[in-house]
Amino acid sequence: MAAFSPILAPSGTRPRSQFFTAVKANFIRDGFPLQTWVAIGALLQSALLLVLPIRFAIIPSTFYLGTSLIDGLAIWSGVRANPYMNGVVPGKVSAQFPGSTTPSQNPIVVIKLAARSNHPLGVFHPHMRKISTFFRDMIEDLDEHSEQYDYLGACSYLANERATANEVMILAYFRTYEGLHKWCHVPGGVHREAWSYWNKDIMGRGKAKEGRLFSIMHEVYQVPARKWESIFVNYHPTGLGATTYKIDVDGQTKWISPLVDASRGVLRSSKGRMALSEGNDHDIYGDDAFPSQSKR
């Protein structure tokens, strides 16, 4: 079988991890419950009413709501391009290691690394600001030394099980457990620095009472070949689909996305993407909603 062909053009430089596309305002918004944001808005509106006639004081909120409505209608009607479609890969695609000739041909290692504040100050506490800085520095370090640690990419998530101060998580991918472990324990490395900060500054002697207000966790999965699969439908590159791989193209170093066409052949079904079938498992259900992209 021929190797799967990536659908996105290679890049001459390694793209930064998807982690760095996170919108910081989301974390600030998560710092307060909805009722607090409503109260802040009400206070600001009241302040305007104290210094301006009512016909002028309502202009800012009316203008904002009006322009938001017009913008939404313009996007809906097609007059303005939909910004949420930026980067979306149309159709049905799957992430496969470049050069693979069979689905999920390579093993993969995944780590979930998360933190949460139970302190009244939430993400605004100095410890959480420091942890956030460590998260950023760790991914920057991995981006810079990706080959040394078999690092492939990472993205971040903000949980929603609480009204505020939710869990912040990094999901990172490595080729090998050895690469991940090496990065975690390299002397003087960013992870070791973060580890020491947690043990000494947060949970150190005499600090444990306050330290218990902060939470960290990780889970590691070492997944053998043919024991994982992925599918993305009309989706922007994310997770495993946002990882990058170094390849050689005519003697030049390039970085390539793992996304390949999954609208036909063995990658059409979950069992096919785990090399357990020919990908025709869904034929019994009738017409495929995603015909071969080559026929479009």
Image (cartoon, rainbow, N blue to C red):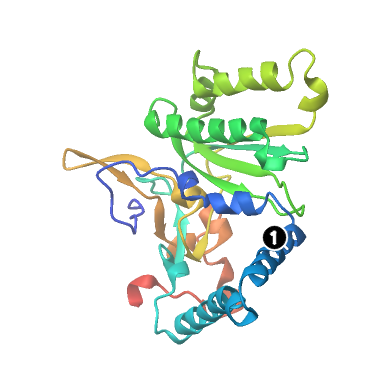
Residue named by callout 1: 40
Give the image location of residue 100, x and y in percent: 39, 46
Residue in view at x 39 percent, y 57 percent: 260
Residue in view at x 34 percent, y 76 percent: 295
Which of 115/106 is in front?
Answer: 115
In the picture provided, is 149 more to the left or to the right than 25? left
Quadrant of residue 64 within the rendered picture? bottom right
Which of 99/77 is in front?
Answer: 77
In the picture provided, is 260 more to the left or to the right than 208? left
Give the image location of residue 205, x and y in percent: 77, 12
Residue in view at x 80 percent, y 14 percent: 206
Task: Say what amino acid the circle numbered 1 marks.
Answer: Ile
Residue in view at x 38 percent, y 71 percent: 293
Count of numbered marks: 1
Residue 293 visible in the shown view: yes
Residue 223 visible in the shown view: no
Which of 23/112 is in front?
Answer: 23
